[in-house]
Image (cartoon, rainbow, N blue to C red):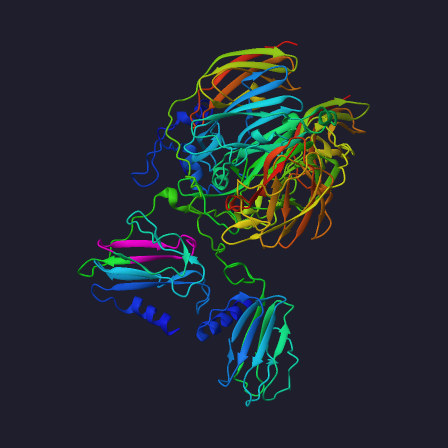
Amino acid sequence: MWHPPADAHSRRDFMRNGFASVALLCTLGTPGTSSRRRVVTSAAMRSQARSPFTPFRRDLPLIPELLPVRRTRRRDVYDLRIREGLAEVLPGFQTPIYGYDGVYPGPTVRARRGRTVVITQHNDLDFDSNVHLHGGYVPAGHDGHPMDVIAPGGSFEYHYPNHQDAATLWYHDHAHGRTSHTLYYGLLALYVLEDERERDLDLPAGDYDIPLAIADHSFNKDGSFRYVDNIDLGFRGDTILVNGAVSPRLRVDRRKYRFRLLNASNSRSYMLRLGRGRRMVQIAADGGLLARPVARRRIPFHPAERIDLVIDFSDYRPGTELVLHNEDGEGGTVAVMRFDVGRGGGREEFRVPRRLRSLETLPAPVSDRHWDLGFGSGAWQIGGRDFDHDRIDVRPRFRTSERWSFTNNSNRVHPMHIHGFLFRVLSRSSGPVHAGERLGWKDTIGVLPQETVTVEPWFGPYNGRYVFHCHALEHADRAMMLQLEVEA
Amino acid sequence: MRAVLAVLAAGLVFAPAASAATVQAVDGTAADNYNNRWTPQTTTIAVGESVTWSFSGTSALHNVASSGANWSFRNGDPGSGSPPASYTFTTPGTYRFICEVHATTMFGDVLVTDASGNPPPPPPPPPLSEQPFPNDAGPPSAFEVDDALAPRLTRLAPRSWHGGARLRFRLDEPAVVTVRATRARVTVKRTRAMLLRGRRTLTVRHLRAGRYVLLVSARDLAGNRSRVRRVRVTVR
Amino acid sequence: MRKGVLAAVAATAALAGATPAYADDQTITADDGLVFTPEAVQIDVGDTVTWSFDNPTTPHNVAAKTDSPTAWATGDEGNYGANHPDVAHTFDAVGTYTFQCQVHPDMDGTVTVGNPPPDDPPPDDPPPDDDPPSSPPPTTHPTTPPPTPSADAVKPTVKSVKLKALRRAVRVRFRLSEPATVTVRVKRGRKVIKSKRVQAGAGTHSLTVRSKKLKKGRYTVEILARDASGNRSRLATKRLSVRK
């Protein structure tokens, strides 16, 4: 039977005054590596008796929302520092991270359509960084092009006009050649864009609208993140973190919840299932709401994609525990998180209407482009070319749509992403396009091995130089990226 | 084949004084099934001797570099069929070398004994920040655990009613509720009903006037039973 | 098992001293030496192999071996003679095809047809330790070090907490000494009615916590701040009575 050390405070004091009040300084590790102060608390001692990787031991952390510095009539002004920090990921350990304001996952920005958001990003790191709002309609100079970096010590004011439909976006580092490391160590955060139309639909909101950032990581014995380079497969971790906790649990009421899922992994694709094949209702994809809700039991989920799901827990009896799991995982990468259904819930105020929106029809595509994805001489390539920031690979015309086909000649999944523009998914060679991808706008599409996927991007509302690339970060950093320029 | 065997023999059998051991990079074209490794993986020499790494017969890109804090060596950028590279070891110890392109499989050690042939000191263990902490938790045993919560009966309010007893209560999940009217520990009458969640009422009828103790319990669809609650009621 | 065959093929090639290469159309020559040269070739799907015999006196032919891993036929079976004309065959499917001369059964060889990756021969199952495709770490590739945050022992402080009861909401105003993650909890007795987590910089902030459960009664608001290094502030508590 484990007993706390003699000088530990009582549990009540511990809960009131926080972890720092129980200051047990105990160095783990060989002498000479204690340049970092590590506080090991009684919670740590307790949790180390059991493995820190045991799933469902921690409650789902709620990602903090970023408070603005100033709100004026037409814009919200924020200030963020890109810096190092310490996160508590494994219970009892402090994990060094890079984060927006030193937090992993970074603070969520809640934006409203029509209100400009201005975020001043300060780079407090030793190397270049920048910020890309993934899925946003952003002018080229504020999009986080890999070459537009903020030097260490510098800062940049990003302006996000938010003239687009409500969607779950995210922002993350995009400095050239670094993304596989900077995103892995924590430089990512959510950006939730809301609008009036979505508010009128009475979808679950407030406490019942929960973002879930899912990523796979591996660890070292001191609790730090362990990164192993793998140019072929991309990084594969052995533990799934949701909002920075190892396979957590969430107590839910017996009512509808909206979950905004983000695949924040470097390159792992998931196949999500709930319990024993339970229904999950998808209401939105990367670029916003779908035309109508789509019921799914099995959801393929590729890096950088976002999926909004509504789950009605009143279908389950109190005390039911539902595990959201990854069918394509093994060992520690199967369990994603667990929902513990509670007793009550109060009156249901939310609903999922049968029609969510009407999708705009695109003008007829003016051209057809074909991109081969594969491994060339020494690097991953699109269309047989590496990334060259001095070369423009395609010049679409402003405010037109084109048909783009990606053919995957390798045996690895490539989630292809276009900056600055959204697309519709037209066809897949591996079978019919699922309604969850077909009935909405997307900005990232997973191209399976030996498959050809055809999408129709629309090149507006802003012109300029953007990039498009594979979002398996190890591939993107090894040159699987090309440039496009839309001329006015 | 003969050439490969000769190298193997040299590495394992003998290392004459002031001469070199040779480590051969092995590609996918080798006679055995391993891809991308060094042969031999461990070489033992005496202090003052040297080791040569050769890449003949390989077609993939390789190089050799030190891995570890106790020495520093790199023959250059990875190339295909690079010329051999050598290093002379002057201090006993264990020295790890890798190919930077295939570091996960192409690694090896040079054990340098001192002049009298004593085994070298073992390498210092890497700091905790470099030792992997693998996830030892297996997949969850069940993806769905049904209802494990017992139903709860609250706000019990009994009253006498028309030759019986009526009990008002709150139920928090659909359950079968049983009310037993007892007198001196003997059950006189029993009523049972399947009820949904909310404010409910159950009546035990045809009771003679007197004092009774009502025992109430609930059992939900999954079979979880609640506590048995007792309330007193006087039937007029 | 495919891997074994490929290895055997590779072994054969190594023994013969030739490194097979994936290439376009190949020519295999047979001469007086009673061997096919080269004995093993590797080609892409759709390429052609031509066997040419430049020996006027010795009869030869080229036939598919009956135990070839991939069944096929050259069309030259049973047709042997001296001064044998060239035989060509186009391979349309991935596989391993073994052939021999029916006059001299020791005279044989292999044609491996595949879709090769740029450098290494493709195994059917991914190699157990996930060999990456050979690529040099580009010399201009930036190296990003893992984070090493410096020890910051300064705890954040939460001061000047002001509460205002609104209809079904509480407005909380506070001053923060450094950027931190702030958790605001509204409790009734011991039960937490609503909690909110925000990220704020140094300075004065105001946020509104809304909940339908905030009816008339006495509440306690707790504020806890945690900075990026993990230091936590003291818990700031304030009581509030909601009258409406």
* Residue B97: in magenta span: yes
Task: Count all numbered tags in the image, as a single digit.
Answer: 0
**Above or below, comparing residue B121 to residue A32 in the picture:** below
Q: What percent of the width, then of the height, locates residue A480?
A: 55, 46
**Above or below, comparing residue A215 to residue A64 in the picture:** below
A168 and A480: which one is in front? A480
What residue span does the magenta drawing correspond to?
B89-110
A391 and A329: which one is in front? A391
Q: Quadrant of residue C164?
A: top right
Q: Is residue B49 found left or right of A66 in the rendered image?
A: left
Q: Quadrant of the C terminus of chain A?
A: top right
Residue A254 in sight here: no
Q: Which residue is at the far left? A: B116
Q: Quadrant of residue C171?
A: top right
Residue B117 in sight here: yes
Q: What percent of the width, then of the height, locates residue C163?
A: 55, 11
Q: What percent of the width, then of the height, locates residue C35?
A: 50, 82
Q: What percent of the width, then of the height, locates residue A31?
A: 29, 39
Q: Quadrant of residue C54?
A: bottom right
At x 55% / y 66%, what residue is drawn? C23
Q: Is residue A47 found left or right of A335 in the rendered image?
A: left
B106 and C94: which one is in front? C94
At x 59% / y 75%, what residue is drawn? C50
At x 66% / y 80%, what residue is drawn? C75
Q: Is residue A247 found left or right of A167 in the rendered image?
A: left
Q: Quadrant of the N terminus of chain A?
A: top left
* Residue A80: in magenta span: no
A309 and C28: which one is in front? C28
Q: Which residue is at the far top? A: C243
